Image (cartoon, rainbow, N blue to C red):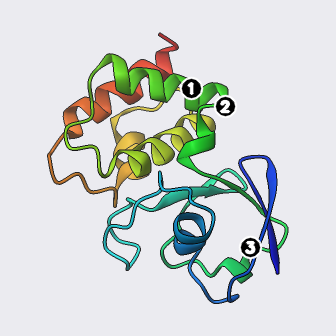
Amino acid sequence: MLTLTINGEQKSFEASADMPLLWALRDILGMTGTKFGCGIAQCGACTVHIDGKPVRSCMLAVGALRDRSVTTIEGIGATPVGARVQKAWLDLEVVQCGYCQSGQIMSATALLTTVPNPDDSDIDAAMAGNICRCGTYVRIRAAIKQAASGR
């Protein structure tokens, strides 16, 4: 039996310690907001926060988490920065197909939590590795800037 703190709540479940966190979230806990993209931690669709830092959940063994706190797309809106990012995403209609957007939002929120007023190079560095097949990068950058401004 494993117990993790996910979005501020203790969740206990049966899983092998080497199971990727992504599959524990999606298949065992029914939290399907975090997406499977590439399976090799390169596309960013599976991004979650571990103790506030963005990580790729497809390659992170659930047994390695121990006492660390997990935040998913289902819980990020409960944070002030996460709520601003989600609002900016809606205001600027960032989403096209939407598949990558949970990972994009998680990375953007982590950026704005550590760098409240990022410049373009900060945004480029933080969002590198988050792939959007629809090419909404211009709207993503604009939404990050709007969320940073507090609008």
x, y percent for residue 100: 32, 51
Q: Element type at marker 2? A: loop
- Say which amino acid is labelled 2: Ala
Residue 78 badge? 2
Residue drawn at (67%, 31%) of the image: 79
Closer to the chain start, of discs 1 and 2, is: 2
Residue drawn at (32%, 67%) of the image: 37
Closer to the chain start, of discs 1 and 3, is: 3
x, y percent for residue 135: 15, 45
Residue drawn at (16%, 54%) of the image: 133
The outermost residue toward the left is: 134
Q: Element type at marker 1? A: helix
Residue drawn at (54%, 34%) of the image: 112
The residue labelled by disc 1 is: 83
> Front-most of 42 and 120?
42
Closer to the chain start, of discs 3 and 2, is: 3
x, y percent for residue 143: 35, 26
Characterize the local packing of mark 3: few (<14), some (14-19) or many (20 or more) Cα atoms within 10 angstroms. some
Marks 1 and 3 sit apart, C-alpha to C-alpha, by 25 Å
Residues at circles 1 and 2 in contact by the CB criterion of under 8 Å: yes
The image quarter containing residue 74 is: top right
Residue 65 badge? 3
Marks 1 and 2 sit apart, C-alpha to C-alpha, by 6 Å
Marks 3 and 2 sit apart, C-alpha to C-alpha, by 22 Å
- Say which amino acid is labelled 1: Ala
- Say which amino acid is labelled 3: Leu
142 to the left or right of 65: left
Whether residue 57 is situated above or below residue 141 in the rendered picture = below
